[in-house]
Image: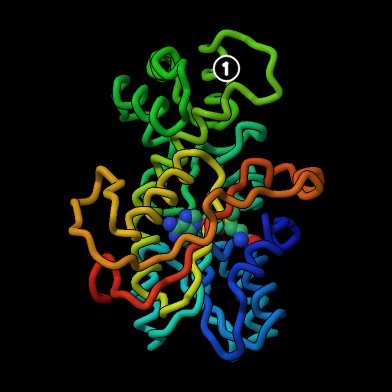
Amino acid sequence: MIEKVVHIPVLLNEVIKALSLTKDDVYVDATFGLGGYTKAILSNQHCKVVAIDRDPQAKIFADNLKRSYSDRFYFKKGKFSELGKFLNELKIHNVAGVVFDLGVSSPQLDIKDRGFSFKLDGPLDMRMSSEGPTAQEFLEEVEEDTLANIIFELGDEIFSKRIAKNIIYQRSINKIKTTGQLANIVRNAIPKKKSRIDLATKTFQAIRIYLNDELKELEEGLIAAEKVLRPEGILAVVSFHSIEDKIVKNFFNRCLRNKTSSRHLPDLPKKNPSLEILTKKPILPSAKEICINKRSRSAKLRIAKRTYFSSTFGEIA
Ligand SMILES: C[S@@+](CC[C@H](N)C(=O)[O-])C[C@H]1O[C@@H](n2cnc3c(N)ncnc32)[C@H](O)[C@@H]1O
């Protein structure tokens, strides 16, 4: 039963404090999940929340919350890169805060049928939205060099070539259908070492990020958020690994408009900054939070405030 799964929101107090919630304002929870942030926002202030999640199962939790906050809560199923479109549909133009809590939710990890977990043996799926090719279909088609690059770039895995080679070899013998099969193929390709971290961790992370196009989504989601924020509106982003954190950091610097920091985006002329960075260094979870919730251990929160200058990325489409 998905309703029984619990997700402990990471850095919740810090996020709520960062948003400095004000009465009747609108906040966007770009990664609703089980609604931990949304619930805290709605119960802390008489404001509105527009929540987004691409996972169809998030709607179950959204429907529950809608019963308590029918006039202050709106849920949109879809990608956060489309948040501008969703707000247009709701005729909302002045947003006081946008929060992203990146990565996967507890049900995505803990329900084996979602196929994200190397700890549970489920179908090799890994799709957040349950649309598009599954991880199994992807691994049936991908070329060895491409796979090795994905595992290296998105998983930071130095044994990427060996892993890709073993996957391609094993798929020629048997279909790779389950997370358990894939985890063992990865583990068997890497020299054994004494580590608390499972040897399959980085490869699973890389395939998940690739399959869900998470980095492009993040770049586009941040741009969409900057465009919809009103002056003095807050952008708060919780990330869980270094690639994501680097994208957030570079994005913030880019909005200072004195640096060009993404190779995917064109150079911009020097102008007035559209964001003021409020966290020189990211905020990390306390030792107490890590003790209560192990999943928080790699979290980083970065916060920025929208200035009165025009958007770095032009008008809202
Ligand atoms: C870490 S969970 C969020 C948990 C939430 N803050 C809570 O307290 O319950 C991340 C969620 O973001 C969603 N997500 C990830 N990338 C997304 C994207 N590009 N667009 C929309 N939702 C996304 C995932 O489906 C997942 O439910």
Q: Does any portion of residue 56 appear in the rendered image?
A: no
Percent of width and height locating residue 17? 66, 69
Residue at 67 percent of width and 57 percent of height: 11
Q: Does any portion of residue 228 appear in the rendered image?
A: yes
Percent of width and height locating residue 115? 55, 41
In this rendered view, identify the residue nearer to me: 254 or 64.
254
Percent of width and height locating residue 112? 63, 42
Q: Which residue corresponds to mark 1? A: 187
Q: Is residue 94 above or below residue 283?
A: below
Q: Quadrant of the N terminus?
A: bottom right
Residue at 61 percent of width and 79 percent of height: 21
Percent of width and height locating residue 8? 72, 56
Label 1 sits on a secondary structure element that is helix
Asked whether mark 1 and ligand 1 are closer than 8 Å, the reply comes as no
The image quadrant in which ligand 1 is located: bottom right
Q: Quadrant of the C terminus?
A: bottom left
Mark 1 residue crowding within 10 angstroms, few (<14) / some (14–19) / many (20+): some
Q: Label 1 sits on what residue type? A: Arg
Residue at 66 percent of width and 25 percent of height: 197
Q: Is residue 27 above or below residue 14?
A: below
- Horizontal side of residue 129 vs 284, given as left or right: left
- Horizontal side of residue 274 vs 126, given as left or right: left
Q: Quadrant of residue 5?
A: bottom right
Residue at 49 percent of width and 28 percent of height: 203
- Horizontal side of residue 64 vs 157, given as left or right: right
